[in-house]
């Protein structure tokens, strides 16, 4: 009878011991994973700080040229012969937001100089 009593105790001890070892290994793996994650987060944070410190400040964007400057540039191109009368009229109409090329032509003829024309 002594043997019958020991077997259940040995079996329980073996199962309990195995569960203890498995739990301990699982906890060690989890701790190792958390440590690795913390190290990776630290390295990423350090790299982000280095990049932020090394990045030059953003240059302010140049302001778009005024409408008068654009009109003067178009007039210069037209006077140099780079733009034909039709191309100049179309570019000027697009810039001014008017689509009446005929109206622009009549204004040019009254003004005499297409480069100094004022749109009605």
Image (cartoon, rainbow, N blue to C red):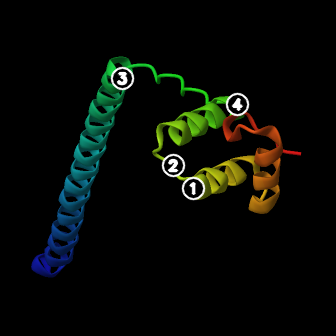
Near-viewer residue (40 or 74): 74
Give the label, 3 or 1, closer to the camera. Answer: 1
Looking at the image, residue 8 lies above or below residue 55: below
Q: CA distance from mark 1 to mark 4?
A: 18 Å
Which residue corresponds to mark 1?
A: 87
Q: Is residue 72 left or right of residue 18?
A: right
Q: CA distance from mark 2 to mark 1?
A: 6 Å
**Badge number at residue 83:** 2
Near-viewer residue (2 or 44): 44
Residue 62 lies in quadrant: top right
Image coordinates of residue 45 in percent, x first then y, are 35, 30
Circle 4/circle 2 CB separation < 8 Å: no
Which residue corresponds to mark 3?
A: 55
**Badge number at residue 68:** 4
Mark toward the start of the polypeptide (4 vs 2): 4
The image quadrant where one finds the N terminus is: bottom left
Q: Name the residue rendered at 10%, 78% in the picture.
A: 3
Mark toward the start of the polypeptide (3 vs 2): 3
Asked whether residue 118 appears in the rendered view, the answer is no
Q: Is residue 57 left or right of residue 93?
A: left
Q: CA distance from mark 3 to mark 4?
A: 37 Å
């Amino acid at each position: 009878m002594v043997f019958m009593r020991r077997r259940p105790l040995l079996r329980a001890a073996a199962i309990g011991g195995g569960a203890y070892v498995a739990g301990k290994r699982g906890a060690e793996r989890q701790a190792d994973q958390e440590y690795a994650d913390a190290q990776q987060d630290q390295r990423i944070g350090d790299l982000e700080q280095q990049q932020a410190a090394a990045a030059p400040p953003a240059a302010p964007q140049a302001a778009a040229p005024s409408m008068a400057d654009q009109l003067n540039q178009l007039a210069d191109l037209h006077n140099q012969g780079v733009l034909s009368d039709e191309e100049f009229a179309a570019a000027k109409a697009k810039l001014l937001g008017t689509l009446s090329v005929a109206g622009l032509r009549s204004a040019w003829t009254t003004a005499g100089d297409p480069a100094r024309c004022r749109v009605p």
